[in-house]
Amino acid sequence: MDAFFASVELLRYPQLKGLPVVIGGRRRREEDELAKLAAAHGGPDHIPTEAFPRLTAYAGRGVATTATYAARQFGVGSAMGLMKAAKLCPEAILLPVDFDEVRRISRLFKRIVADIAPVMQDNGIDEVYIDFTAVPGADEDGGRVLARHIQQRIFEETRLTCSIGVAPNKLLAKLASEFDKPNGVSVVTMEDLPTRIWPLPCRKVNGIGPRTDEKLQALGLRTVGDIAARERDWLVAHFGRSYGAWLSDASHGHDERPVVTESEPVSISRETTFERDLHAVHDRAELGATFTRLCEQVAADLARKGYVGRTIGIKLRFADFRSVTRDTTIDAPTADAQVIRRHAGLGLKRVDLARRIRLLGVRVGKLSRG
């Protein structure tokens, strides 16, 4: 889906189409402000554009969930700190995330896709993989006709656009889906590797992270083609047997992963980044309330999805950005908030809390059906 979180908000505020809009920030406070504006002007779609909160006024630690394409032209991107985004595009409009509406439309667009092409893998709230090999008409114009049909159906039902990559496998399809955003269809074949895939920066490949990219750059490998030009044994020698072999396969467009229609989650977690660094003693009440809320949210997520878990863990990130985790495995699986709170609290006691805390998280793993 194209700039999904932002596009969902533009359904509510159509007057902002074409403007730089960033989604993120403090949800409750900004929702209250927008509700007051809507009441004063006769509805959300009647709020004057100049009345919306601007990114330049933001102060805090929030990150951008996403941004409209108009904002992306200034360099604003997902997961970017809002303070940094404000320097790049101070006049961008800042809107909070409506998670309930995002989830509703996510379920809707996936249902539309599944009706057309049932072999579908859920890949997050705004993305799916589809194997439409067996769908009637799949070969017409290299898959473009079916892709356009999917786009049309999604737009008719949601008024939102999506971009589709058509390719022989998941790795190439993921790359192709980014080629012609928004509302694009890109078809990539193995014959297109030299002209369309090899010139791409290494970082574009899903599975090459920042650290690997740094190492690749240090070795003089800046594009996918640079990796493809190296011998498989050389890549294995520098990156290990498994990952080096994967780099070789990926750079040549090979990916044997099937489209998986059902998968079980490994764990369920919740975390929050504080607006200011908190101290375990001086901010004990605030930390305790947040900790309890996170445990309750994880418990509610487990209950809603029908899981229980045996491993209860915590995650802390300190002011110096160093992170620690602690896990405890209990005898009987649980989805009870009090049990999660008690064992997560024991995990906290195993951490030196002298440093100020930037982020706090709670996780339940080793899941099974409840």
Image: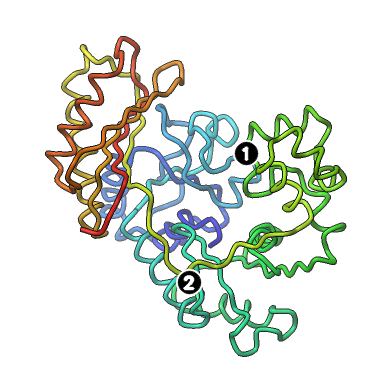
Depth order, front residue of 192/87:
192
* 56 horizontally vs 207: left or right: left
Depth order, front residue of 31/204:
204
- Amino acid type indicated by mark 1: Gly
Using a 10 Å C-alpha cutoff, classify the residue at mark 2 as few (fewer than 14 neighbours), some (14 to 19) or many (20 or more): few
- Amino acid type indicated by mark 2: Arg
The vertical placement of 352 against 285, above or below, is above
Task: Residue at 50% x, 32% y: name it.
Answer: 81
Q: Which residue matches tag 2?
A: 159
Instruction: Estimate the x, y position of residue 108 in percent, counting from the top left.
Output: 40, 72
Task: Residue at 34% x, 54% y: name it.
Answer: 99
Q: CA distance from mark 1 to mark 2?
A: 34 Å
The vertical placement of 187 against 267, above or below, is below
Instruction: Estimate the x, y position of residue 228 in percent, counting from the top left.
Output: 83, 48
* 166 horizontally vs 89: left or right: right
Q: Which residue matches tag 1?
A: 209
Q: Secondary structure at mark 2?
A: loop
Which residue appears farthest toward the left when viewing the image?
Answer: 338
Instruction: Estimate the x, y position of residue 178 in percent, counting from the top left.
Output: 66, 57
Q: Secondary structure at mark 1?
A: loop
Picture mark count? 2
Instruction: Estimate the x, y position of residue 295 in percent, counting from the top left.
Output: 21, 39
Using a 10 Å C-alpha cutoff, classify the residue at mark 1 as few (fewer than 14 neighbours), some (14 to 19) or many (20 or more): few
Quarter of the image for the C terminus: give it. Answer: bottom left
